[in-house]
Amino acid sequence: MLCDMATTTTTREFIRHFARLKKAAANGDEVIVRDRKGQAYVFRAKDAGPSLAAQLTDLCGALRTGAPIKNLGGFGHNRT
């Protein structure tokens, strides 16, 4: 996928391939969507959202279930 370049598409293709074009916009690309009348719309990410790691860190320990929080201590080659 090309980064930092405008991608031009039709509204129909934009709807069909929204997930791919959304990723392109999140990576810094501008997606120009043209309708049947020739009107152009620019689709780009406003700002970067929180990463998955940041979202999971916020959730860790946020809910009190009474069960201890699991970790990977003791697994792998350094097991004691």
Image (spheres, rainbow, N blue to C red):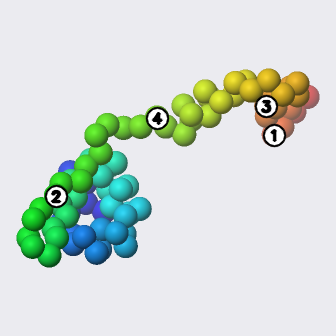
Q: Which residue is mark 3?
A: 71
Residue type at mark 4: give it. Answer: Pro
User: Which of the two discs, 4 and 2, labels the residue nearer the N terminus?
Assistant: 2
Q: Residues within 10 Å of mark 2 (few under 14, many from 20)?
A: few
Image quadrant holding the N terminus, namely bottom left
Please say if the residues under marks 4 and 3 sit with CB atoms less than 8 Å apart.
Answer: no
Tell me: residue 74, above or below residue 5.
above
Q: Which residue is mark 1?
A: 76
Q: Residues within 10 Å of mark 4 (few under 14, many from 20)?
A: few
Estimate the x, y position of residue 74 in percent, counting from the top left: 86, 32
Mark 3 secondary-structure assignment: loop
Q: Whole-Å distance between the Cαs marked 2 and 1?
A: 51 Å
- Residue 78 is left or right of residue 32, and the answer is right
User: Which of the two discs, 4 and 1, labels the residue nearer the N terminus?
Assistant: 4
Estimate the x, y position of residue 20 in percent, counting from the top left: 38, 63
Foreground: disc 2 or disc 3: 2
Q: Which residue is mark 2?
A: 41
Foreground: disc 4 or disc 3: 4
Q: How many marks?
A: 4
Mark 1 secondary-structure assignment: loop
- Residue 36 is left or right of residue 19, and the answer is left
Q: Nearer the viewer, residue 39 or 67?
A: 39
Tell me: residue 47, above or below residue 61.
below
Estimate the x, y position of residue 16 in percent, counting from the top left: 37, 73
Residue type at mark 1: give it. Answer: Gly
Mark 4 secondary-structure assignment: loop
Residue type at mark 2: give it. Answer: Tyr
Image quadrant holding the C terminus, namely top right
Q: Which residue is mark 4?
A: 50
